[in-house]
Image (tube, grey):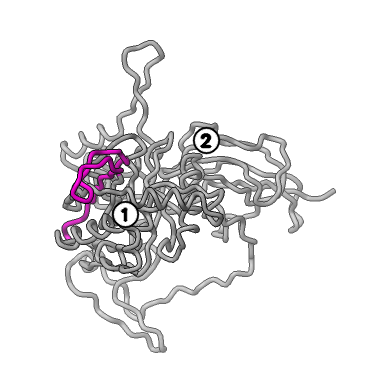
């Protein structure tokens, strides 16, 4: 009889500093036999719904969480019975060494990584002189260099793994709002991770002013959902909606927004679009006005690279991107997401149309990967599909500009010194005035408009 052992699969870190995910559905049940990398569940992060592959081949023995439950990263969600090649007793839990950190899969889509017990352990460096007392470490005095008798050099400040509290960006934000020093908080999460509850409990211990304790109590207060038939319906703020709200508030009150508008006669662009749809190379491809606008944005960025940048507050630098990851705002049943097309500036119009179609289809189906939702450099939001002409879009955090594309309308317009019925579109450009001057923003918007009014201008701008 083959020996088996029980292994737990803990909710992995899905990237971007996310601390929790909601179990949307299980694709397996207790007693099912699964193979390595078989999809076993769908989980919703703060950005998208992603699929979890199985890290083991074996039999499901337990599902620890039910659909609809929000689970913290590192908590067990499913147990497997797997073959034990090490010869342990049948049904026995994993041996003690299994509790040590291993190369487990931590990003959805990358599959399981083969375990290795022969991974070398790095020896911790020691200092010749005794460690400085806590008072000295916390003071503003500059660190003192210490040199060992060998070739390695170390700093006076201890470089052990405990040199910085382990927490995530949302937890650090909560601690900052409540005036909590994370150095004083003991983490109860996986591997000593400091959680939101740890911060709230620290405040509740009476170490902080009453105002901070009141704020923590409000933040932790549960939200109830009334039964059907009542006059109000309360929906917990979580998942994509929660992330979007936090990102938009942060952007609106961090970057000084400026919005400019330009109304353009896009009749030539619409005529070009009609011809392309009938051409053989574009047969079967989804071509829309957004496709041409996206291409116009990419061409205009060559002449106006200052809009393809970001403001790095921490390092007091303006970061200029030499590539374009073009974000496309997509309305989904779970809220607004902004996936982006990597290296869009390298794509032909045909490839761009394919990428746009795949991106929007995946977003609406809730299948966008965390990788596609990060790393954008400039964005477009198509409000024209809702019949809207113009707006003041809010910047996607970390980007310098976003262009809102209005509806194409047949409008009386001056054409060749006469009034004619033309196809007209309004473009709304919001940009971060910290790093984009009015002249830069205006030139970029004018270039996009010129390309849509006369697609032949692409030859002059290329």
Q: Residue at 37% x, 85% y: name it.
A: 148
State whether residue 140 is above or below residue 179: below
Q: Nearer the viewer, mark 1 or mark 2?
A: 1
Dot 1: what SS?
A: helix
Q: Nearer the viewer, residue 201 or 368?
A: 368
Q: What secondary structure is the stretch in magenta mostly built from?
A: strand
- Percent across and percent down for residue 308 are 29, 63
Q: Is residue 60 left or right of residue 221?
A: right
**Residue bounds of the magenta highlight:** 406-434
Q: Is residue 51 left or right of residue 245?
A: right
Q: Residue furthest top?
A: 229
Is 250 in the magenta?
Answer: no
Question: How many numbered marks appear?
Answer: 2
- The residue labelled by disc 2 is 24
State whether residue 430 is above or below residue 161: above
- The residue labelled by disc 1 is 452
Q: Residue furthest right?
A: 1
Q: Residue at 25% x, 64% y: name it.
A: 134
Quadrant where the C terminus is found in the figure? bottom left
Name the mark on residue 78.
none
- Percent across and percent down for residue 252 are 21, 46
Is 431 in the magenta?
Answer: yes
Q: Residue at 34% x, 58% y: name it.
A: 455
Rendered image quadrant of residue 296: bottom left
Dot 2: what SS?
A: strand
- Percent across and percent down for residue 363 are 46, 43
Q: Earlier in the sequence, mark 1 or mark 2?
A: 2
Q: Residues within 10 Å of mark 2 (few under 14, many from 20)?
A: some
């Amino acid at each position: 009889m083959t020996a088996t052992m029980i292994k737990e699969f803990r909710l992995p870190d899905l990237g971007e500093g996310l601390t929790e995910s909601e179990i949307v559905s299980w694709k397996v049940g207790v007693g099912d036999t699964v193979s390595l990398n078989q999809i076993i569940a769908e989980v919703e992060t703060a950005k998208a719904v992603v699929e979890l592959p199985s890290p083991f081949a074996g039999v499901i023995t337990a599902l620890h969480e039910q659909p609809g439950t929000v689970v913290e990263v590192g908590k067990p969600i499913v147990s497997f019975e797997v073959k034990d090649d090490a010869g342990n007793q049948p049904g026995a839990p994993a041996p003690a060494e299994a509790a040590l950190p291993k190369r487990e899969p931590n990003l959805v889509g990358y599959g399981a990584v083969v375990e290795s017990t022969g991974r070398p352990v790095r020896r911790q460096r020691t200092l010749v002189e005794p460690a400085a007392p806590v008072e000295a470490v916390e003071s503003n005095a500059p660190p003192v260099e210490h040199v060992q008798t060998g070739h390695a050099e170390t700093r006076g400040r201890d470089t052990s793994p405990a040199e910085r509290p382990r927490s995530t960006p949302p937890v650090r934000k909560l601690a900052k709002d409540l005036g909590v020093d994370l150095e004083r908080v003991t983490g109860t999460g996986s591997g000593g991770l400091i959680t939101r509850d740890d911060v709230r409990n620290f405040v509740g211990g009476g170490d902080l002013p009453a105002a901070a304790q009141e704020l923590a109590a409000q933040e932790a207060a549960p939200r109830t959902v009334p039964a059907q038939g009542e006059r109000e319906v309360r929906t917990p703020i979580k998942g994509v909606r929660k992330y979007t709200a936090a990102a938009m508030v942060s952007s609106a009150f961090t970057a000084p927004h400026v919005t400019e508008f330009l109304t353009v006669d896009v009749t030539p662009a619409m005529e070009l679009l009609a011809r392309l749809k009938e051409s053989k190379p574009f047969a079967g491809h989804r071509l829309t006005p957004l496709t041409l606008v996206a291409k116009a944005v990419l061409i205009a960025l060559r002449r106006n690279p200052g809009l393809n940048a970001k403001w790095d507050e921490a390092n007091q630098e303006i970061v200029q991107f030499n590539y374009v990851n073009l974000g496309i705002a997509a309305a989904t049943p779970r809220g607004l997401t902004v996936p982006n097309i990597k290296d869009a500036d390298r794509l032909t119009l045909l490839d761009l149309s394919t990428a746009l179609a795949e991106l929007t289809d995946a977003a609406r189906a809730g299948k966008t990967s965390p990788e596609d939702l990060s790393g954008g450099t400039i964005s477009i939001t198509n409000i024209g599909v809702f019949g809207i002409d113009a707006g003041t879009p809010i910047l996607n955090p970390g980007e310098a500009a976003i262009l809102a594309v209005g509806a194409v309308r047949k409008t009386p317009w001056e054409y060749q010194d006469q009034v004619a019925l033309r196809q007209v579109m309004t473009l709304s450009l919001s940009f971060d005035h910290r790093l984009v001057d009015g002249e830069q923003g205006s030139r970029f918007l004018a270039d996009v408009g010129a390309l849509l009014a006369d697609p032949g201008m692409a030859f002059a701008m290329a």
